[in-house]
Image (spheres, rainbow, N blue to C red):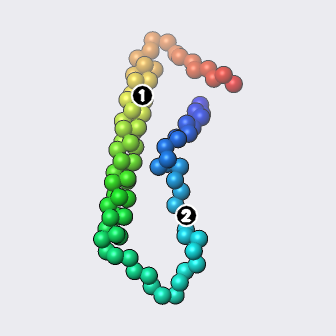
Amino acid sequence: MKHPIKKIDSPRVKAKITPSAKPKKTQKESRPHSEIVNDLQANKIELEKQIDELRKSQARLEEINSKYLDLYQSAPVGYFIFDKK
């Protein structure tokens, strides 16, 4: 049985990483190391938040799966699931 995929409205999820539209220059442009470190730290924090959200979602899905598995395994008779289709 197929379930519709729920759209996530989080701005983090909607954000797309796209290549820069600026043409590449032949000379190397250097940014200060502190700016690069700050960007990397911000990305790390964002990734950690996303990992936490994914872990919570996975735990919830495992809980739901276990609930229905127990329900169907311990049923004295068969169950049917009907879609609106």
Is residue 53 placed above or below 18 in the rendered structure? above
User: Is residue 73 found left or right of 26 in the rendered image?
Assistant: left
Q: Is residue 55 visible?
A: yes
Task: Tell me how many marks there are.
Answer: 2
Residue type (three-letter) at the residue carrying disc 2: Thr
Location of residue 10 with respect to 81 vertically, above or below: below
For disc 1, the neighbor class at 10 Å (few under 14, some 14 to 19, many from 20) is few
Query: Is 81 left, or right, of 38 in this rendering?
Result: right
Task: List x then y, in percent, for residue 50.
Answer: 39, 48
Whole-percent x, y for residue 76 in the image: 45, 12
**Element at label 1:** helix
Residue under the image location 40 percent in, 17 percent down: 74
On the image, which quarter does residue 38 sit in?
bottom left
Q: Residue at x 38, y 42 (%)?
A: 53
The residue that mark 1 highlights is 64
Question: Dot 2, crowdedness within 10 Å: few (<14), some or many (≥20)?
Answer: few
x and y percentages locating residue 17 in the rendered image: 52, 61
Query: In the rendered view of the protein, which quadrant contains the N terminus?
Result: top right
| Picture layout, residue 58 above or below residue 66 | below
65 or 46: nearer the viewer? 46
Q: Nearer the viewer, residue 44 or 67?
A: 44
Q: On the picture, is 33 further left or further right than 73? A: left
Taking the view exactly as shown, the residue that stands out farthest to the top is 76
Type of amino acid at the residue the image marks with label 1: Ile
Residue found at x 55% / y 36%: 6
Q: Quadrant of residue 81?
A: top right
Which mark lies nearer to you, 1 or 2? 2
Quadrant of the frame with the C terminus: top right
Of the numbered discs 1 and 2, the one sitting upstream in the chain is: 2
Front position in the image: 49 or 75: 49
Instruction: From the top left corner, tell me how far across and down residue 31 is, in percent.
Output: 38, 76
Identify the disc placed on residue 18. 2
